[in-house]
Image (cartoon, helix red, strand yellow):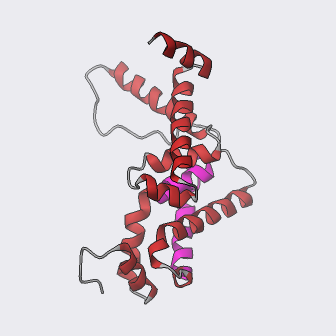
């Protein structure tokens, strides 16, 4: 049983290794957001996301004892998640899921008195999601990890197993690709406009 609220991730890993279910639950909960983003990026969409996340939980429960260095938990978790997501993709025999609009979030309340503003925001959200889905895998992964808001750049680089500068370059390129796709501008148009700005 966990006594301290301020336990470090490494301490939670050690406790989970010893069979503490609450520690394991806290570890998964603390990493759930970025982990879900990583799996989403591998699957290419939200279809089967919950099923794969459940499989990842089972794999973590079954293999937490294989982790030799508790301080490397996030990297280990990322590898487990990627493998499970790729295994699922191979069993489906497809990587990219066509955009059908089903992943659009429903607004909590009215954005404004004007319904056309709601439609514009939904349309923009749909175009951003479509652009993110069309990113090459290495850019989609870093984009979704960065926008989960839960990892530092150093942690993202560790999860992706690349140097931090490589991760930063990929993130800049991913954001530019999404922006270009959403605005309909080609890279040449953007660079041309920068000269006059």
The residue depicted at 51 percent of the width and 35 percent of the height is 175
Q: Is residue 86 above or below residue 116?
A: below
Determine the residue located farthest toward the top in the rendered image.
Answer: 196
In the rendered view of the protein, which quadrant contains the C terminus? top left
Counting from the top left corner in percent of width and height, residue 136 is at 65, 42
Counting from the top left corner in percent of width and height, residue 62 is at 55, 81
Q: Is residue 127 above or below residue 77?
A: above
Q: Nearer the viewer, residue 26 or 196?
A: 196
Quick check: is 52 in the magenta stretch?
A: yes
Q: Is residue 81 above or below residue 105?
A: below
- Residues in magenta? 35-63
Counting from the top left corner in percent of width and height, residue 89 is at 69, 57
Quick check: is 161 in the magenta stretch?
A: no
Determine the residue located farthest toward the bottom in the rendered image.
Answer: 18
The residue depicted at 55 percent of the width and 54 percent of the height is 163
Q: Quadrant of residue 83?
A: bottom right
In the rendered view of the protein, which quadrant contains the N terminus? bottom left
């Amino acid at each position: 049983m966990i006594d301290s609220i301020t336990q470090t991730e490494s301490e939670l890993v050690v406790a989970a290794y010893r069979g503490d279910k609450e520690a394991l639950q806290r570890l998964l909960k603390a990493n759930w957001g970025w982990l879900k983003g990583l799996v989403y990026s591998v699957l290419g969409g939200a279809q089967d996301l919950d099923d794969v996340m459940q499989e990842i939980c089972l794999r973590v429960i079954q293999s937490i004892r294989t982790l030799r260095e508790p301080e490397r938990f996030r990297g280990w978790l990322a590898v487990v998640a990627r493998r499970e997501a790729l295994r699922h993709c191979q069993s489906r025999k497809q990587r990219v899921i066509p955009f059908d609009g089903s992943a659009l979030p429903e607004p909590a309340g009215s954005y404004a008195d004007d319904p056309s503003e709601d439609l514009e925001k939904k349309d923009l959200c749909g175009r951003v999601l479509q652009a993110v889905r069309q990113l090459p895998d290495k850019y989609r992964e870093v984009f979704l990890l960065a926008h989960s808001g839960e990892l530092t750049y150093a942690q993202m680089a560790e999860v992706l197993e690349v140097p931090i500068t490589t991760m930063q370059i990929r993130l800049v390129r991913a954001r530019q690709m999404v922006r270009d796709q959403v605005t309909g501008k080609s890279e040449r148009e953007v660079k041309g406009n920068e000269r006059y700005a």
